[in-house]
Image (cartoon, rainbow, N blue to C red):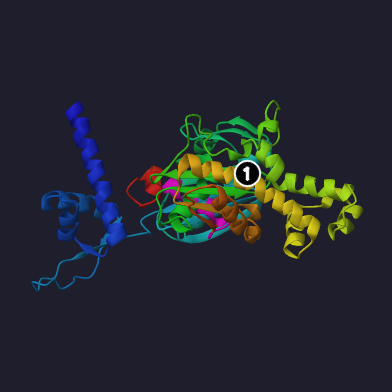
Amino acid sequence: MKHTGDATLLRKVNESAVLRMIHEQGPISRSEVARRLHLSPATITRIVNVLLEHQLVVEGSPSLSPQGRRPVLLEFNPRASLIIGIYIHRNMIGALSDLNGEILERRVVPSVGGKAGVERLTELIRDLHQLSTSYGPPVRGVGIGAPSITVFEKGEVVWAPTLGWRNLPLKARLEEVLDLPVFVENEVNLIALGESWRGAGRDVNNLVCISLGEGIGAGLVLDGQLYRGAHCAAGEVGYMIANERSLGRKYDRYGCLEGLAGSAGIVRRALTRLGAGEESVLRRQESTDSSSLTAEAVLSAAREGDQLARSVVSETVDFLSVAVANLICVLDPDRIVISGDLADFGDLFVEPIRARVTEVLPLVPEIVLSELKMDAAVLGALAIALHETDSGLVARPSQV
C-alpha cells in the first residue's frame, strides 16, 4: 500500500510540475518540458494527454527548432474552468474569474449580519454561478474571505463581530446548498495572497501584508507559503502591546494596537485633543456631531497640514512603527506591504514608518503601499479556491 501511495503522490507531483511549467513558460514543446524537469518523454506524453483531456492545456502553433523540425507547442488554457471569489467587508464583493485571475464579472451587495448574511452570501454566489453559464466552462470552486479568525480546514468562522457570526461552519452551510467546493479563509491572509499573486509581493518569497482600518491585521507569506500558525491566528498583530503599561488589561472589542492605531483609536485621540481645547479644522465637524468624526477626516486634515491632525498621525505612526519593527525582527521578510481601508492615505504612513524603523534596526526590508487595494482580498479568495482544487495551477498561490 505504501508503494502505491508513493507512486500516486509522485504522479501528482509530476503533473503539477508539468502544468506549472507550461503555465509559466508556455508556449513550450513537450521535449523542452521533459528536458527542464528531467522527466522521460513517455512520462511527459502521459501527463500532457491527461492535461489535454481536462482542457488545462491546448496545442498551439508549431515552431521551428534549430534542427528544422516543427514541434507542437503547449499553452495553458485559462478558460478551462472558472472560479468565484468573495470578500466580506462593509460590502460583499464577489468576482468571477478565469484561471489566470482575470476578473470577468463583479457583483457587490451590502453586508448584513446573522442568518440573513449567510443567505445574502449564498445568493451572491448563486448569481455569479449563473453568470458563469454565458462563458461556458464550469466553476471549479469558491473562495471566501471572512473578517475573522477562521479555522481553514473546517471552513469555520470563529468570531466575526461585525456580522454576528460565532463558530459558524460557513463552508459546510454553503456546500450543502450550492453543490460547489467552498474554502473559507481570514480576509487579511487573502489580502497577502492577492498581493503575492498579482500585486506588490509577486516577486518575493517572504511577505508581510499589514491591513490598516478599523482593525489591524497581518497576512504572512513565508518561504512562498501562507503561514496560519498553530491556531490559525498568525498575524493577529492588532493585539500587539505598545509597551509595559499595556499589560494587565483585558482587550475585548479591539486589541491593544488596534485601539491605538486603528480607525477608532485615531478618532478617539483626535477627540481628546479637541476636548482639551486645541485648535483644528476638525472642530467644525466635532462641534456639529462628535460621533460623525472619522479617521479619514483626521487623515485628510493631516494631509492638508492641520497641526492637531498631524500630531495624531505622528502618534499613530509611532505605534505602527513599533509593531513593524517587531515583525521585522521576528520574521525578516523581503517586503512589507501596507494595505486596507486606510491605504488611500499611505503617503502618511509608508515613508514615516520606514524612517522610524531604519533608525533602530540594522536591516530593513522594503516597505511599500498595496498595488491592488480592495481587489487584493478578492484575488486572494480566487487564489485559495484555485489552489485547493488543483495545486499545480498558479505558481505563487499554489504554495498556500
- x 91%, y 54%: residue: 288
Left or right of residue 20: residue 320 = right
Quarter of the rendering containing residue 249: top right
Q: Position of residue 301 (x, y in %)?
A: 77, 61
Q: Is residue 103 visible?
A: yes
Quarter of the rendering containing residue 348: bottom right
Identify the magenta region.
371-386
- Whether residue 380 is in magenta: the answer is yes
- The three-letter amino acid code for the residue at tag 1 is Ile
369 in relation to 322, above or below? below
Picture quarter with the N terminus: top left
Picture quarter with the C terminus: top left
- Whether residue 364 is in magenta: the answer is no
Left or right of residue 106: residue 283 = right
Left or right of residue 327: residue 100 = left
Q: Is residue 187 visible?
A: no
| Prevailing SS of the magenta stretch | helix
Q: Nearer the viewer, residue 60 or 127?
A: 60
Q: Position of residue 31 (x, y in %)?
A: 14, 59
Q: How many marks?
A: 1
Q: Position of residue 113 (x, y in %)?
A: 68, 39
Quickly name the residue at label 1: 216
- x 55%, y 47%: residue: 360
Q: Nearer the viewer, residue 11 or 283?
A: 283
